[in-house]
Image (cartoon, rainbow, N blue to C red):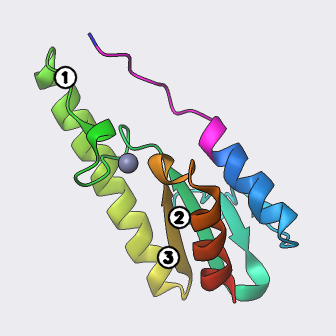
Amino acid sequence: MRRIKSKGMLPELAVRRLVHSMGYRFRLHVRTLPGKPDLVFAKYKKIIDVRGCFWHQHGRCSDSRMPKSRVEYWRPKLRLNQKRDEKNTRQLAILGWKVLVIWECEVQNAERLRRSVSQFLS
Ligand SMILES: [Zn+2]
């Protein structure tokens, strides 16, 4: 059976390190906002959310494939995660926050990541 990574901290740490090195300051996991978003830039009213491809079911990403066993367990669980993400993103938008979602599989390409972060925050 393929290995299922738990909600890894590594992608989020990599993003935090990069954004910090770009000179931006942020708060982490703000409890008062829907979904406790990962990186919160209050000054800009912007949020960066780092999502694991499997747990948050990244579109056509190969890391989001449903496990072949215990589908009846995984399917509803992963659907629920997706629903929750959609709801949180909607609520954040209503509150006036802009959200950039960074997927786990996008973290490896540091140069591209840097570009999308600086575009988003500028
Ligand atoms: Zn992905």
Q: Which residue is mark 1?
A: 73
Q: Is residue 55 above or below residue 30?
A: above
Percent coordinates x, y for residue 121 in the rendering: 68, 83
In this rendering, position of residue 31 left or right of residue 72: right
Tally of numbered discs = 3
| Other residues around mark 2 within 10 Å, as few (<14) / some (14–19) / many (≥20) | some
Disc nearest the viewer among 2 and 1: 1
Residue drawn 52% across and 75% down?
Answer: 99
| Other residues around mark 3 within 10 Å, as few (<14) / some (14–19) / many (≥20) | many
Q: Which residue is mark 2?
A: 34
Q: CA distance from mark 1 to mark 3?
A: 29 Å
Verify CB contact (< 8 Å) between mark 2 and mark 3: yes
Asked whether residue 100 is drawn in magenta, I would say: no
Q: Which residue is mark 3?
A: 92
Q: Residue furthest top?
A: 1
Q: CA distance from mark 2 to mark 3?
A: 7 Å
Asked whether residue 10 is drawn in magenta, I would say: yes
Which is more N-terminal, label 3 or label 2?
Answer: 2
Residue drawn 60% across and 82% down?
Answer: 120
Residue drawn 49% across and 54% down?
Answer: 106
Q: Amino acid at mark 3?
A: Leu
In this rendering, position of residue 54 left or right of residue 27: left
